[in-house]
Amino acid sequence: MGSYNMIVNLDKKESLSPHDFGSGAKMAEWCYHHTPLVRALHNLLAGPWKGDRVYVVASHLPKDDDSYSGELAAARKELGIKSLYRFACDECRNLQPDEVDTEDHGLRYIYNHELEVFLDLAHCPVNLDDIAPLPLLIAPGGSDFDFDVNDEDAAEKMEDAEAWWIDSVRSIEIRKEPLEDVDYEEFRPNFTEMGLGRYYELVNLDKREYFGYYTLSMRKLAAPVAGGCDIFWDLQNLLAGDWKDDRVYVIATDAQSGWELPGNEDLCADMAQSEFKDLCGFATHNYTWYDVSKRDSSDQGLRYIYNHALKVFIDLEHCPRDGGKAAMPLPLLLVIGNRGDVEGDYPAGGDGFEHVGAWCATARSIELSKEPLPGVDYAEFQPGFLPPDSWDDAADDDDDEDDDD
């Protein structure tokens, strides 16, 4: 069943329950950036709870657990209690969402004055899989946090850093702006459930649908033969079928801009009112997962890609293949956020990189066909996306070939 959590302020005898904020009570069900409970925790620690003993306590900790040491042992003796979780549930006033501030006020810097370190949330992997660091840093209980960490390095970082701030919670300060004349070391715990990187989703703004999986790199998407990924074929078949004439983009998980394109004023207005300022986060929480029962992941022989707005066409038979390692053009022409600075991206400075994202503003005018369109006299466009040096046969093991179902 796992372990359940409460946030408790021992000094004010107040608590927060994940259930009251629309989340499950396991750590992996609520401990993410942008969730109301995490925002409430940040806002309280920046305001009325500043300087208090505040912890994330788990139901699974027995009364004689080794985690009860230092400040926690002193607190148990002072309060005459055995279980902090039972104390939070039974002895503290449970604050409701309408009693606390759950808005995003841009709180970015988290200082620990006793340890002389700080976190910059902009440097945490907010758009990777969203794990918020502070709850884990103030949660006693070892590494049992219900996260399914599938990257060994990420798991080691999580285990090494979690619960590190237990004895110094009173010294936490949360702010919008950095403190002047404070020369602390920056701490980047990088709590993730996967390896650090950049991943992509297919997003249809008109049908409000999205599709992909959380380890979909550009290398996997744009080099389908070598990468073993069939979402490349999904993209082509969708643009020829259900998603024809729609605004369809390939969005990086950390893309903070790029959808401010002609015709996207409605989206920009919606996002301005949303707590999610990145399109992947916005789409994931507001759009519908594409109905996979309608999926067609086979090669349908679509050879010609037309862009009627630009009056050009691509003949895929004239694009370099290089044994399947070369990048196919369509994902790169429609991508927002490929910067070429991480493994798996198409590299900056590579052949054709100047064309990355070049068709985003004209996505609605794309048409795919098996045969040349009669009576259409467009110039042939050959973007020349060649295989980056990093896209060799060992670039990906591709053990997640089809994690999207």
Image (spheres, helix red, strand yellow):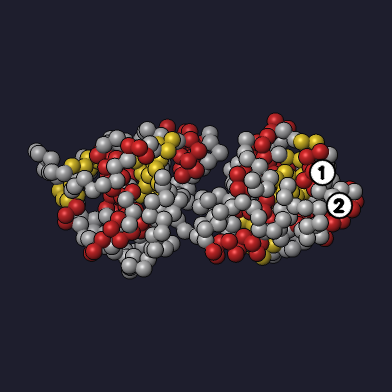
Residue 216, horizontal then vertical, whole percent = 40, 53
Image-quadrant location for residue 401: bottom left
Pick the residue in front: 3 or 29: 3
Left or right side of 211 for 378: left
The correct choice, above or below, for 58 with respect to 163 in the image is above
Q: Contact (CB < 8 A) between labels 1 and 2?
A: no
- Picture coordinates of residue 381, whole percent (x, y): 19, 52
For badge 2, the amino acid type reads Arg
Residue 261 can be seen, yes or no: no
Q: Nearer the viewer, residue 219 or 24?
A: 24
Which residue extends farthest front?
Answer: 1
Identity of the residue furthest to the top in this view: 98
Q: Residue at x 15, y 48 (%)?
A: 379
Task: Please rate how many residues cluster around mark 2, counting C-alpha atoms within 10 Å: few if below 14, some from 14 to 19, many from 20.
Answer: some
| Cα distance in 3D space between marks 1 and 2 | 10 Å
Reading the image, the residue beneath label 2 is 76
Residue denoted by label 1: 87
Which residue is situated farthest in the left direction here?
A: 375
192 w.r.t. 102: above or below? below
Q: Is residue 4 above or below residue 390?
A: above
Q: Residue at x 58, y 59 (%)?
A: 190
Residue 70 on image: x %, y %: 82, 60
Vertical side of 30 occupied by 392: above or below? below
Q: For the point 22% across and 40% down, which residue is it?
A: 367
Mark 1 is on which residue type? Phe
Q: Looking at the image, which residue is at 68% across and 48% down?
A: 3
Q: Position of residue 151 (x, y in %)?
A: 52, 61
Q: Secondary structure at mark 2?
A: helix
N-term mark: 1 or 2: 2
